[in-house]
Amino acid sequence: AGREHDWAKLRPRAQAVLRLLAVRAGQAVHRDHLVVAFWDGVTTPSTLHNLQVTVSSLRSFLEPERPRGGSRLIARQGDSYRLVLAPGDVSDVAAFERAVRDGRRARAQKRLEEAADAFRIALDHYAGELLPEDGQAEWVAADRERLRREAANSAVALAEIRLAQSRPVEAVEAAEHCLEVDGHRDAAWRVLIRACDAAGLAAD
């Protein structure tokens, strides 16, 4: 609603629950997954109550003007919770994953320019490590690594497409982008060498 929230008023665990829901914005997250992530995986009446209290506090914090049970942002679906994306709302993770899927589909169908555009959009949405402020928390580590891997794959794919299109300078840029994300990606080093050679960048 155009207002900045005072996040200091929200307990750290509630903030973390909200970040997990945000990573999966638009998707239902089962309560068991939340219990595993934030209550040591022990499902008891007490932990389920604590989860319900946490979600209630999030709803009140995000939409203080809404009556009890009237939240539009955090919906309950059976035993799952979902952060709702309304028309016009943006999730960089969702946009990144959608662009990666579009790129892979277009490349498989030999629509290379469309694939390149999609991979470029994906890389524009990838802003680096997912939620670095959460450190090595188990609930975010797997998603962080998966997104990093997909970003590197997208950059390599873009580099290969541009090299095949005889656009070696753009291929160099895409390969270097991949190596910024994952400096140990052999495919990126190989395409970078070929692209530099094709672009006449012998010294590089």
Image: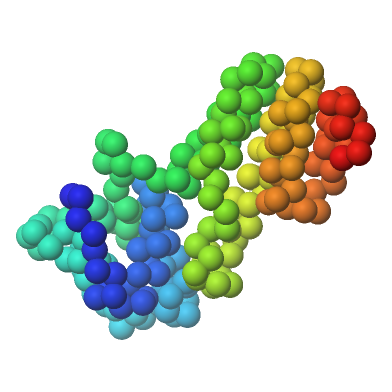
| Foreground pick, 198 / 79 | 198
Residue 56 found in image quarter: bottom left
Is residue 54 visible in the rendered structure shown here? Answer: no
Question: Residue at coordinates 91% horizontally, 39% vertically from top-left?
Answer: 203
Q: Is residue 126 left or right of residue 39?
A: right
Question: Residue at coordinates 24% horizontally, 75% vertically from top-left?
Answer: 9
Q: Residue furthest bottom?
A: 46
Q: Residue furthest front?
A: 203
Q: Position of residue 162 (x, y in %)?
A: 73, 24
The count of marks equals: 0
Q: Position of residue 134 (x, y in %)?
A: 50, 70
Question: Residue at coordinates 37% horizontally, 67% vertically from top-left?
Answer: 17
Q: Is residue 159 left or right of residue 199?
A: left
Residue 107 found in image quarter: top right
Note whether 50 is above or below 143 in the view shown. below
Q: Is residue 157 left or right of residue 52?
A: right
| Foreground pick, 37 / 5 | 5
Question: Residue at coordinates 46% horizontally, 39% vertically from top-left?
Answer: 95
Q: Position of residue 15 (x, y in %)?
A: 35, 70
| Foreground pick, 81 / 202 | 202
